[in-house]
Amino acid sequence: MWTLGCLPCLPRPAKRCLEEAVAEVWCRVLGLPDKSIQLCDNFVELGGESLLALRACASLRYLLGKAEEDDGEDGEFGHVSGAFAVSELLRATDLGAYCAALRRSGHDLPGGTCPSTFTGAEPRPRQLELENARREVGFGPLHAAAQSNAVETVQLLLERRARATAVEPGAQMTAMHYAAMCKDSGALELLLASKAPVTVRDARGQSLVHAAARSGSVQCLRLLLAQGGRKVLEWSDRWARSAVHWAVLNGHPEALELLLAARANPRPKAITAHQMAKRTHLTQEQPLDLAQRVHGKESQLARILRLALEEEEDEPLDADKAQYMMTLSQGGLDRLALWELRTRLSAKRVKREQCRIFFATDCLPAAVASLKSAEKVCAVVLRADGQRLADVLQGPDPLAQEPSQVLRFCCLRPDGSLLAGQVAAWIAEAPGWARAVGLWRRFNEGEGEGALSFKITCRRSGSRFAALSSQNLAVAAAARLQAALGWRPQVRRPDLEVRILVSDSDLLVDLPLLFQAALKSGGSEICCAGMSAPVAWAMARSAELQVGDRVLDPMCGKAVILVEAAVSWPQCHFLGCDLDAAQLVGAAQNAQLLAAHSATHLAGAGRVELLHGDAARLPLADGAVDVLICDIPFGRQYGTIEGCRESLYKAIFREFHRVVDARKGRLVLISSLEQEPYVLAAAGFQVQEGRCPGAEPHAWRCHARRELKLGFLDARLLVLHRPGDDGGEVPEVAKRLWWETSAGRGDWASLKVSERPPMQRTRGREI
């Protein structure tokens, strides 16, 4: 047994000075070789940024004995203050100055003295700093130039084919991320001009807007928002934090005001605790809570957020300003929907959640029915988040419990009937029924004063409330509503439909008021798919169809072009012709679907007739059609390239010239890029390949040529008019046609729905 007087001489731990300890932490956080940092080194110049600075500050706070655990373990991300604040590290000129600031605040390691390797170090050139600092993590020349905002160097590297989207290992940050953190936007502007997307993310899920908000770079943030960065405003990173969170956390009020002015949500939608646990151990906070905790309740950031939240609430919702919910009929209509709501309806409380847009307005039903972007408009009865629904179920979230408790939870309610009864009672007692039913009567012109017939449609998605059966909930809610309101359940053609939509994050109960009856020919309602629906509609739009026009597609295939045209321009007559009988079978199915839909919803919609025949020998009289629209073969799927050039184009253009009206006829074609000269030559234009023998000179006037992408194929859209009095001149290829907006193809969906008829009432329709 050892005694106190005979203890052996055990080795004592080596004493380190504060500078050595800080340098070791920097090397570990930045991924640099050991002992490669000196007193003259700056944390930011070595590649540090706010996230890495937060890790370094938390590690130093724990190392110096000021925290029992790492700061991240307590669930309060970003809670380092005083001498260990992130801003103190980022403001320090070098390692020596940062250590001196720590000592002044009473933080030091006892015993150790600063070795000569630190005190006698000479400043190193900046180029060597960047090279040594990033050699281990794959930091490229473009990354370094973007981080330094060296505009000329960035331009030179881009000219040498450097990729703006190249990422470094680990953090997966691109050069654009580093450029977005600079105060000046010169380098970022060059990178975006090289057609780099603004939607790139790093390994932490952070976008360019996140990076600019984190660093407080107002110029870069303004540039990103102007270049389309608004679409990523609501994106969250791995910590469930948006750009608003990071502007608040790092104390950048000017960046926060810019984000809020760009319609960023001051109260981002919260995710469930189960989803949060999958991402990180941290707890989720709203920006206002974060601002009050880190910067104080009376800080400028907290005041800005409180003001934004007050403006979002607007005035109290009175009886004349009802709450609506609309769904979009297809993607790409967000801008049109927001413009319609704010301009046409003067809507308040406009808020988008996934594919739904909630708003409040006091406009007349006719004004609401004129919305072109909406697929369905509903009156909101009840909205609640997932936590509120869990509280109604009289217990915590089942998925948040232990596995044994989850099993017990499910065994107590084997069929979910008890759960359904609790939720149904809560729904039936909701205070929004009187307002929603009054709104339904207003849209139906006071009809249905007596007992109404109704049907409940219940849908549940996700696994959080898996014990809640949608069928049981629908039955229980129907019984409750019948007893409370005196309504009569009816499955076929009810007066009104009650929708109950349950997901992991929320519950919504609404009454559909209006629906869009137009055929969704670009989606699932087309039986047999053919040409891309937006391209087919654009061809019909380029033909500038008039009332009574006779429209022919001599190679109609599945007749998608004619169906799209018939939906948007129903006052015309449409004829399709094809030599392939199998293609005509699909065309007939699409035409029958259009006819059936027209009989139900679209009275007077255009009728599509089909004909089996050869485009080179059409069974039509001279001048029989006003407009000819055709996706002519390229020689890839049908025929050969040489066969199209030598015989097909000559034969079909002779027929086109014969059957199209010689006074006001129009011709809209799609050709591949390599076949376009031969198509123009067959039409009688003088091109490099010459005019085809036998072609009618000056038979057509080329009105427009537009470049077009069909998948991976480069194509051309050609618009030809009669008469050909311009000497056969061919205009330059354009990126947009005369009827397009500055957004080009991105606005085709918005322009297409602008041709829709008004929405129809939902009463008595087949569900």
Image: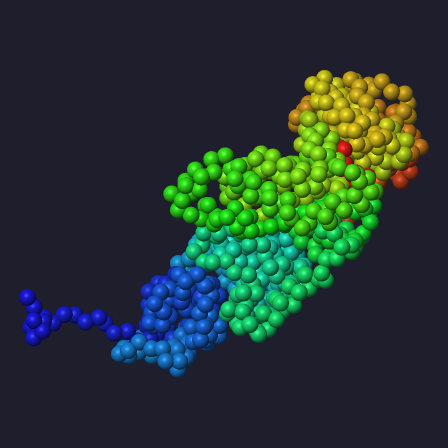
Q: Position of residue 507 (x, y in %)?
A: 60, 46
Q: Nearer the viewer, residue 50 or 321?
A: 321
Q: Where is residue 214 in the image (x, y as percent from the top left)?
A: 54, 64
Q: Is residue 97 visible?
A: yes
The quadrant in which the C terminus is found is top right
Q: Which of 352 and 658 is in front in this view?
A: 352
Q: In this view, does 683 lie above or below 250?
A: above
Q: Nearer the viewer, residue 707 or 320?
A: 320
Q: Is residue 50 left or right of residue 218?
A: left
Residue at the image position 70 percent from the left and 47 percent from the top? 433
Q: Residue furthest bottom?
A: 104
Q: Residue furthest right?
A: 663
Q: Is residue 528 left or right of residue 48?
A: right
Protein image colouring: rainbow
Q: In this view, does 636 lie above or below 612?
A: below
Residue at the image position 76 percent from the left and 23 percent from the top? 592
